Image: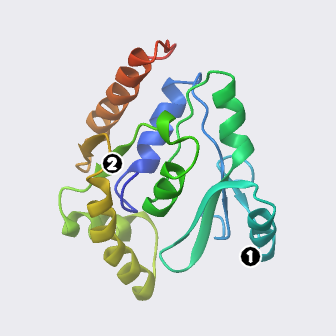
Amino acid sequence: MGPSGVGKGTVMQMLRERHPEFVFPRSMTTRPPRPGEQEGVMYFFVSDEDFDVAIAQEQLLEWAVVHQYQRYGVLRSEVEGPLEQGKVVVREVDVAGWRTIMESSLRDRVVSVFIMPPSPEALKERILKRSPVGEAELAARLLDVALETEAGRSCDYHVVSHENRQDEVYREVEAAIVAEMRKNGLQTGGG
């Protein structure tokens, strides 16, 4: 987990490419697709009404309102099934989602990695480079950074994400996952 724009998506993509044995649950979201995103690949894009149904039917392991605008969550079936099969599930979450998972029956199986920016200014630049955002959304994201950073102190591992050094960030995150797998007697097939 980490603030929006810190590079979580890049690290997750590298993990997907290098560790096909890991399970990467898809998110359900009420936000519209960004350019290049396809339904059912990384996200299920749904209406507010469909998201409400998923909540009411307790289909979501965790969900949250992100940046005061859109909702994101993960279906229980995307996480619990693979875990029962002994697989490693890697999930990108925001702070609210992490707290929900830590209150669930899965809390003893969670290893958390917090990816943080080198500075708030660097994060603002990354957010603006990544995709156009309005003033209100940018302000909301920057307000969230302080709260996310405070919550991130409770994570098991901490990694600083410097721009143009995503390979280093990836290696640190991968090392944390592999260390935890070894502690639990699991093997990794990637590299």
Residue at numbered disc 2: 114
- The kind of secondary structure element at disc 2 is strand
With respect to residue 100, does 77 lie above or below? above
Please state the horizontal and vertical placement of residue 117, each as a whole percent of the image.
25, 56
With respect to residue 168, does 58 lie above or below? below
**Front residue (pair 36, 3):** 3
Residue kind at label 1, given as amino acid type: Asp
Image-based side of 77 in relation to 128, left or right? right
For image coordinates 64% across by 48% down, the residue present is: 42
For the C terminus, the quadrant is top left
Please state the horizontal and vertical placement of residue 146, each as a whole percent of the image.
27, 70
For image coordinates 22% across by 63% down, the residue present is: 122
With respect to residue 95, does 91 lie above or below? above
Q: Residues within 10 Å of mark 1 (few under 14, many from 20)?
A: some
- The kind of secondary structure element at disc 1 is helix
Between the residue at mark 1 and the residue at mark 2, the CA separation in whole angstroms equals: 29 Å
Residue at numbered disc 1: 48
Of mark 1 and mark 2, the one earlier in the sequence is 1
* Total number of numbered discs in the rendering: 2
